[in-house]
Image (cartoon, rainbow, N blue to C red):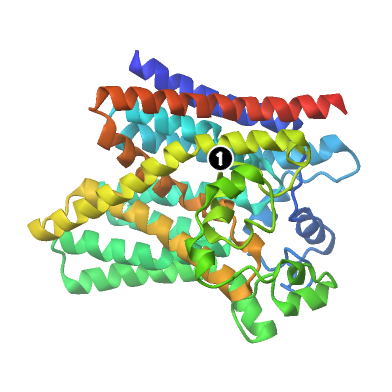
Amino acid sequence: MKRDKLLIVLIAGIAFRIFVFLFQAPFNNDYHFEVIKYIRETKSIPLSTQMSQGYHPPLYYLLAQIFYCGDSTFFRLKVLQFFSLLTSILTFVLLFSLVKNHLTSPKIQLYSGWLLALLPQFVMFGNFVSNDSLANFFGALIIFQSYLFLHTRRFRHLLWLSVWLGLGLLTKATFLAFIPVLLIFIVVVQLREKKRLLTIFMQTLIFTLIVTALGSYKYVQNYIHFGRPFIHNTDPLVQEATGWPWAKDQKGTYQGLSSWLDWNIAKLVKEPTLSESTRHSFFLLLYGTLWYQYIHESNLEGNLTRFKYFGSFLYILALGPTLLMMAGGLKFLKETIATLRKKELTEPFIQKALSLGLFLSTLALIVAIGLKTDVWSCFQARIFFPAIWGMIVLYSSGLEIIENKRRLFKITSSFLNILYISFIIYFLIELGLLLAK
């Protein structure tokens, strides 16, 4: 019976992505299609300064050529968008496999699975013509492969891990945040097996060389042409070259200590979309872009109408899983202290530490780029979706705390069920508004 419920989650998650794909337009605010078209027409990869999305590594755009059959009709663009749908489904299947095989109990598997199946922003950004979808896939694949390496400790799994990370870097620079965490993970796993230091050094070196060989193209290209490996589209160099200085209108995000400490979700409830009252808070920007379409970025335009206040309702309901994640973080901190005292690294603890390490490292990268650029759009939750498994680990850890407290778990599960149903209603509202046009 419990397996049947999990199977329903799997089928529903796949079906939900297909359902949204049918009425979701191919493009969002980031015009990745321009790069795809440029590569087809010129048979070359653009420099970072040639177009707004030219700063991204090229793998997504190269693979998208397989599905690109022109832009003369909407159907042709939907064929291209199908590539994103395909990677979105594969990402969900991989994450569902992790839920099924690595979370502690059927109840926790069920609620974690539903969050991955229905989270609107995760579904939407998986479906856009964008490198986000492929990046999310490689993020899930890296976690999956890391767990395999930890369990088997076979060198071939380490080699595959290096391939997936290299291809991730060839897709999006977000994976730079994965490198230090995975290097520590590889060394820890091998030290735990009491391998010789020379063996550890050689295997880690091979891992690093493969990752560098596969993933360094864009960074080498940037260095050759501009004298530095890392260029962002908020960079004045790109803004001036493209003639589109959009970033200057988003400056002034950072306002000192208040940008770190303003966690007043009531502001989001009052103004559920981008506003002056919330755009200076790092937490509120991430919270808003995780649980709702805080920024207008697609043909789903309910956030431009009075229905935007359905987002307020979602923000209130999302307090439940958010508090569970925070509780899960405290639980992991307690487990870390106990592990240090015992001086015994168990496989489940290493899995959890790796997942949270990747998630927190990616968050740190988002904040670092946001602070450097002072541009509010850098603080978007979708950027950490390649490491979303860490968020699910926090969520499941929070559920573990209350799992055996029957009354509290019953109240919490009712709250979560309302949230999940509301995710479906959100898309039905968007579909209704599209049909009403």
Residue at horizontal 36 percent and vertical 58 percent from the top: 357
Q: Quadrant of residue 76?
A: top right
Q: Return the residue found at the far bottom.
A: 227
Q: Return the residue found at the far top.
A: 1
Q: Is residue 379 left or right of residue 92?
A: right
Which residue type carries mark 1? Tyr
Residue at horizontal 63 percent and vertical 58 percent from the top: 59
Estimate how packed mark 1 is, as few (under 14), some (14 to 19) or many (20 or more) residues with alpha carbons within 10 Å: many
Residue 64, horizontal then vertical, whole percent: 70, 49
Q: Is residue 284 left or right of residue 47?
A: left
Q: Secondary structure at mark 1?
A: helix
Q: Return the residue found at the far right.
A: 72
Q: Quadrant of residue 427?
A: top right
Residue 381, horizontal then vertical, whole percent: 56, 52
Depth order, front residue of 293/58? 293
| Location of residue 387 with respect to 104 vertically, above or below | below
Residue 183, horizontal then vertical, whole percent: 34, 66
The residue that label 1 is drawn on is 315
Q: The C terminus lies in which quarter of the figure? A: top right
Q: Quadrant of residue 45?
A: bottom right
Residue at horizontal 83 percent and vertical 34 percent from the top: 75
| Location of residue 243 with respect to 345 vertically, above or below | below
Q: Return the residue found at the far left.
A: 342
Residue 20, horizontal then vertical, whole percent: 68, 31
* Residue 36 visible to the viewer: yes
Depth order, front residue of 214/3? 3
* Residue 106 visible to the viewer: no
